[in-house]
Amino acid sequence: MQIQLADFVKAKPEHDELAGILRACVHCGFCNAACPTYQVLGNELDGPRGRIYLMKQALEGQAVSRLTQQHLDLCLSCRACETTCPSGVRYGRLLDISRPMIDAIVGRSLPERIVRGLITLIFPYRQRFGALMAAARLAKPALPPALKQKIPPKPAAIAWPKARHARKMLALSGCVQNILAPEIDAASTRVLDKLGISLIPVPGSGCCGALNYHLADPRRALALARNNIDACRPLLEQGAEAIVMTASGCGVMAKDYGALLQTDPYYAEPAARFSALVKDLCEVLIAEDLSVFKADHRTIAFQSPCTLQHGLRLSGVVETVLQTIGYRLVAVPDEHLCCGSAGVYSLLRPKLAARLRDDKLQALETHQPDIIATANIGCLSHLQSAGNQKIVHWIELLH
Ligand code: SF4
Ligand code: SF4
């Protein structure tokens, strides 16, 4: 396909990459069949092929409008289209680079700027998000039902095993997960401890930056990435083996630090080293002897987050870990479809997110499992917001 990038795009370091991605798309439309928003809305411009066309127009300097921005806003960034694409089009990368450029041209309304600004200033920072949740719990009785559903009860205090092994791995402090569900990192620490590995929380680390990155705020996202690289460096130099991600969404971002900072004169090399050591929790577990764990009688439906399937390309790994231990897994129809969580999509597009959530829960309940397991805090809290009490992070099933 002929690509004529506009001058303002040619001035960006990513211009060759963008042209390459656009050129790879042959407009076959196979990806539309895998796209959740296309399936629900049935509009070509709310599917990947149409969105690629809109981004191409924008990057070639043709007129873009509020409508262009809205079609891109409706995208979940789930990347199911990437997994399906026979030509290997890197749709997610195209969207991440194009969105801030299109936002700069079209602008945002004041209410949108306020909502997005508050999200990017509060959610990635644990103390701020913790204060927000504490206030939300106090105000919960007076809130509308849609918001009420999103506020979980305060988690109980949990004891963490002390670091006592020669083998050490690192855990970033993260952002929302340790406020909403601290039991996930506690369970990960307990499980790794049983395998002879101490999981060490990294002082001074924080959010991976994914939330800001996908809200067209790459500047703050990369500042968060640099902070995590600096925070982990001394512990890696002391021999820590890996940086373990207990949320698949954060894993995708952290594994991308090397690519995202490749033109940074100070961070390109440390970022590449950092990313090479990032492992999703399931990658760590699958390489260990799991005979110390025993399954119980419960049947499991596993909701494989988009970030695990399409971002990390680790389909089937969690399932293999659970089956190795002895759990019986039931089949889940349309496994590739997003649950609607997609970072803060469920806050920005609540109606569509709720529809996708309800469809996903129906699929997960098809074979009436005792438990629904997932691998990402966003999916966990979004699915729980429908009132389903069966949902846990898969690591909590290892005893
Ligand atoms: S992204 Fe891939 S599957 Fe979709 S239209 Fe382009 S080439 Fe075809
Ligand atoms: S990322 Fe997901 S929602 Fe967006 S176009 Fe691709 S399949 Fe559709």
Image (cartoon, rainbow, N blue to C red):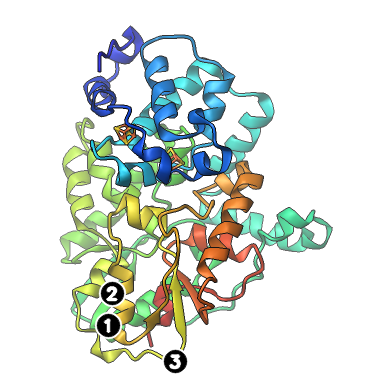
User: What x and y, as percent, mark residue 75?
Assistant: 49, 38
> Which element type, helix, strand or loop, lies under badge 3?
loop
Amino acid type at image mark 1 = Thr
Is 222 left or right of 287, judged from the image as shown? Answer: right
Q: Residues within 10 Å of mark 3 (few under 14, many from 20)?
A: few
How far apart marks 3 and 2 lie (CA) works out to 17 Å
How far apart marks 2 and 1 lie (CA) works out to 6 Å
Residue at label 1? 324
Determine whether label 2 and label 1 are within 8 Å by CB.
Answer: yes
**Is 318 located above or below residue 23 in the figure?**
below
Label 2 CB less than 8 angstroms from ligand 2: no
Q: Residue at x 42, y 60 (%)?
A: 335
Q: Residue at x 37, y 89 (%)?
A: 295
- Quadrant of the displayed image that contains ligand 1: top left
Q: Quadrant of residue 89?
A: top left
Residue at label 3? 297
Is 188 left or right of 269, judged from the image as shown? Answer: right
Residue 381 seen in the figure? no
Residue at label 2? 320
Residue 7 seen in the figure? yes
Q: Quadrant of residue 57?
A: top left
> Which element type, helix, strand or loop, lies under badge 2?
helix
> Which element type, helix, strand or loop, lies under badge 1?
helix
